[in-house]
Image (cartoon, grey):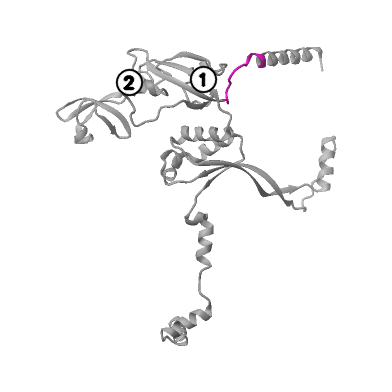
C-alpha cells in the first residue's frame, strides 16, 4: 500500500470516528415516546395534539383518546423537520419547530379550486363548507349557484406553516410496547400480540468434501473443477426463529390498510423489531386452529357395522341400495 493510500485511509478513519463521537442522543431507528402539540403559525389553529388538556381546552375529540405517541426516528412518523429537531436530543428535552407549508400539507394551488356540476354532489351536501368526494378527490364546497358548485380540492391546511411544540418523555425499549406502537401507527388499532422463540426445521444445502476442496483451491488461485453430474444434497436442521404473533380479529381482517399493504407492513415490522417472521394467528371455537377444527370434522364418521345397524333399524335393505347404485352407473 502506498503512503498516499495509507494517508487517505487514516483520514477516513479519523472522519468516521469524529462523526461517531458527534452522534449523541437519539438517532434514526430509536423508539421514543413523544408529547407534542401542533398549531398553524397564522391564527394558532390546533392541528394535532397528544395532550388531553389541550384537546379539552379546544373542545375537540371528545370520543378520542389523547396520550403520548411512540414513534421511530427516521421512519417518517412525524414531519421531517420535526425529526431533525428531535435527533440528538435526550429524555426530557423539548423544543419548537416550524414546518414550512410545502413540507406540511402543501402549498395552496389555485388550479385545485374547480367548478363542477352540482349533480355530482349528494343533495344533503349541497351547501358551503360541506366535505365531498368527487371522482376520487376530497374537497369542500365553497359556493353553489344554480346547477354549478365551486369546490376546493386543496387540503384544508394547504398553504399553512405549522408550529410543533415537542417533548421527549422516554425511550421505548420493551419489544411488545414497540410492536404495539408500530401496529397502531400502521393500522390505527390495538391488537393482542406476543413474542416467542420458535424452533423450526429447515432444509439447508450440504457442501460435499469435493466442493469444499474445490472452493479452497479457487480461493488459493487454483481452478475449481465442476462436477456436472453431482446433485445438491440437503439436510434438515433445527433453527430458532424470533416470531411475532398477532391475534387475528374481524377488525383486522377488514382493516383497509391491512388489506392493501400487509406485505409491506410485515416487512417494516420485521426490520424495525429485528425479528425473523410474523404469524397472524386465528383462534376458532374451543381454542383450536383452523386445521385442528377441520381434522375433528373429518374424523367423526360412523363405522361400517354401525351404519348397517342403523339401516336395519329403519328397515332399509343395504344390498338393494348397492344394486340400484350399480345399475345407475351402467
Whether the magenta-drawn stretch holds residue 16 is answered as no
Quadrant of the rendered structure where residue 213 is?
Answer: top right
The answer to whether residue 47 is visible is: no
**What residue is rendered at 79% in x and 49% in y?**
227
Q: Left of 100 or right of it: where is 3?
A: right
Pick the quarter of the image with the N terminus: top right
How far apart marks 2 and 1 lie (CA) works out to 23 Å
**What range is drawn magenta here?**
20-30
**In the image, residue 224 above or below residue 107:** below
Residue 305 placement (x, y as % from top left): 53, 81
Disc 2 is placed on an element classified as helix
In screen coordinates, is 6 left or right of 329?
Answer: right
Residue visible at 32% across and 25% down in the picture: 60
In the picture, the disc for residue 300 is none
Percent of width and height locating residue 295: 53, 62
Q: In this view, does 233 lie to the left or right of 291?
A: right
Outermost left residue: 146
Q: Where is residue 243 drawn, in percent x and y?
A: 60, 42
- Mark 2 Cα-neighbour bin, 10 Å: few <14, some 14–19, many ≥20: few
Q: Mark 1 points at which residue?
A: 168
Q: Main secondary structure of the magenta part?
A: loop
Above or below, 224 against 303 in this view is above
Amino acid at each position: 500500500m502506498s503512503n498516499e493510500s495509507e494517508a487517505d485511509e487514516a483520514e477516513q478513519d479519523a472522519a468516521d470516528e469524529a462523526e461517531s463521537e458527534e452522534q449523541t442522543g437519539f438517532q434514526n431507528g430509536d423508539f421514543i415516546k413523544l408529547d407534542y402539540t401542533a398549531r398553524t403559525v397564522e391564527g394558532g389553529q390546533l392541528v394535532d395534539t397528544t395532550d388531553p388538556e389541550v384537546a379539552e381546552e379546544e373542545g375537540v375529540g371528545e370520543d378520542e383518546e389523547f396520550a403520548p405517541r411512540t414513534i421511530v426516528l427516521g421512519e417518517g412518523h412525524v414531519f421531517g423537520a420535526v425529526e431533525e429537531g428531535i435527533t440528538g436530543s435526550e429524555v426530557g428535552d423539548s423544543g419548537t419547530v416550524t414546518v414550512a407549508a410545502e413540507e406540511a400539507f402543501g402549498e395552496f394551488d389555485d388550479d385545485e379550486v374547480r367548478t363542477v356540476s352540482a349533480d355530482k354532489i349528494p343533495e344533503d351536501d349541497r351547501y358551503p363548507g360541506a366535505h365531498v368526494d368527487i371522482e376520487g378527490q376530497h374537497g369542500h364546497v365553497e359556493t353553489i349557484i344554480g346547477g354549478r358548485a365551486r369546490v376546493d380540492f386543496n387540503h384544508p391546511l394547504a398553504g399553512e406553516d405549522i408550529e410543533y411544540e415537542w417533548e421527549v418523555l422516554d425511550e421505548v425499549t420493551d419489544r411488545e410496547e414497540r410492536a404495539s406502537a408500530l401496529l397502531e401507527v400502521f393500522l390505527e388499532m390495538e391488537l393482542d400480540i406476543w413474542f416467542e422463540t420458535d424452533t423450526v426445521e429447515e432444509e439447508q444445502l450440504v457442501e460435499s468434501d469435493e466442493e469444499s476442496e474445490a472452493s479452497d483451491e479457487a480461493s488459493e488461485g487454483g481452478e475449481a473443477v465442476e462436477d456436472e453430474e453431482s446433485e445438491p444434497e440437503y439436510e434438515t436442521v433445527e433453527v430458532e426463529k424470533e416470531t411475532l404473533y398477532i391475534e387475528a380479529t374481524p377488525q383486522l381482517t377488514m382493516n383497509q390498510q391491512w388489506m392493501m399493504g400487509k406485505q409491506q407492513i410485515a416487512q417494516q415490522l420485521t426490520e424495525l423489531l429485528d425479528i425473523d417472521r410474523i404469524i397472524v394467528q386465528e383462534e376458532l371455537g374451543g381454542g383450536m386452529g383452523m386445521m385442528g377444527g377441520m381434522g375433528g370434522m373429518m374424523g367423526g364418521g360412523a363405522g361400517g357395522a354401525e351404519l348397517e345397524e342403523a339401516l336395519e333399524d329403519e328397515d332399509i335393505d343395504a344390498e338393494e341400495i348397492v344394486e340400484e347404485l350399480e345399475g345407475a352407473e351402467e
